[in-house]
Image (cartoon, grey):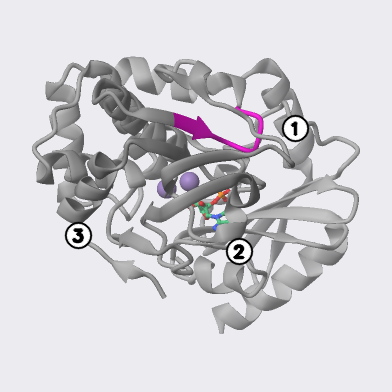
Amino acid sequence: MSKRINLEEAGALLLGASSLILCCHVSPDCDTLGSALGLLRFLEQQGKDVKLLVDDVINSSFSFLPGVEKVIRPEEGQEYSADLFVVLDASSWDRIGCCNQVVKYNKLLNIDHHISNTEFAEYLYLDAKAAATGEIMVDLFEACHWEFDKAMAECFYTAISTDCGSFRYSNTTPKTMRQAAKLLEAGVNPNEISEKLGLNSVASMQLLAKVIPTMTFAYDGRVAYMKLCNELYNKQTSTETFVNMVRYIEGVDVGIFFKEVEPGVTRVSMRTCKADAAAVAVQFNGGGHVRAAGCTVNAPLDEAIAQVLEAVGKQLS
Ligand code: AMP
Ligand code: MN
Ligand code: MN
């Protein structure tokens, strides 16, 4: 169990440390990266010795994020140490790759918004109502009377906008929009960020053209899914938006995208209108939110599909 702290206490922990290591979850999205990069920039300006570790490749389409070139990819066997280790937007200790081994720290702080948070950290600030960890960052800055510059605001805006589907998903609240508005006041141009976030690579679209024909419906059309076999999978080609193709279809409650990322290892992305996606994902040691969740199943593609569909079926009835 973690000690639940408030934003002022989180701020005091951050400013009380002279050295910090920040860390994002694996398969980093713009919420975990934007939150970490904005905070990194602020802490650097406070004169802190601060590093950002991410145990994964970073999608080249995120290269517009201010400071992304500072991200360090750690390797097993290396050692990093700091007073405070800060894990952002990750709900469990096994979501940060080898960062859970290479970092030596005195205190561990987790800032997160996943309902499935496993309370792995000594100190936890969890707000499952926040649309994004980026929204919590704006709350934090406000609670602590810290000011963000334009680059930090761009990081946090990108974080928020990513996780709420550009303010379209059900996690978007009046507060999400108010916090985003403050970022616009700090100079963010939302069109610039949307254009960068929405830009698809040619390779990604060519891959999508191969994935769409796999679209299959199950449970009387309440479930729609697509799949990507390992032979066609390429880590460099983004598939992040593919699940959206099965998300909004008449009669569909659950949209799922399956990709075999290694032979016998299948990554699952789920989006729902009514069913509890997180409840399904946690059965496979994954997690997420009620309407968007993910997990990794240690089984070949079609076997993983059968297992997940069975669990989804139980969730539907
Ligand atoms: P994705 O389908 O990868 O976009 O993930 C949807 C949501 O579920 C995001 O909030 C992820 O952080 C979360 N999520 C995905 N995979 C996992 C996992 N293996 N464990 C915990 N949370 C996950
Ligand atoms: Mn995330
Ligand atoms: Mn998030």
Disc on the earlier residue, 3 or 1: 3
Nearest the viewer among 44 and 244 is 44
Disc on the earlier residue, 3 or 2: 3
Could you classify mark 3 by the number of other residues whose Cα lies within 10 Å: few (under 14), some (14-19), or many (20 or more)? some
Residue 10: say if magenta: no
User: Pointer 3: what residue?
Assistant: 6
**Residue 235: assigned label:** 1
The image position of residue 298, as x and y in percent, is: 81, 62
Residue lying at the far left in this picture: please name it.
145
The image position of residue 275, as x and y in percent, is: 49, 71
> Looking at numbered disc 2 in the image, what kind of residue is underneath it?
Gly
User: Pointer 2: what residue?
Assistant: 286
Ligand 1 is found in which quarter of the picture?
bottom right
Label 3, label 2: how many angstroms apart (C-alpha)?
26 Å
Could you classify mark 2 by the number of other residues whose Cα lies within 10 Å: few (under 14), some (14-19), or many (20 or more)? many
Kindly state the secondary structure of the residue where label 2 is placed. Answer: loop
The residue mark sitting in front, 3 or 1, is 3
Residue at 57% x, 45% y is 103
Label 2, label 1: how many angstroms apart (C-alpha)?
20 Å
> Looking at numbered disc 1 in the image, what kind of residue is underneath it?
Lys
Kindly state the secondary structure of the residue where label 1 is placed. Answer: loop
Disc on the earlier residue, 2 or 1: 1
Q: Is residue 275 visible?
A: yes
Q: Which residues are magenta?
A: 51-58
Q: Is mark 1 within 8 Å of ligand 1?
A: no
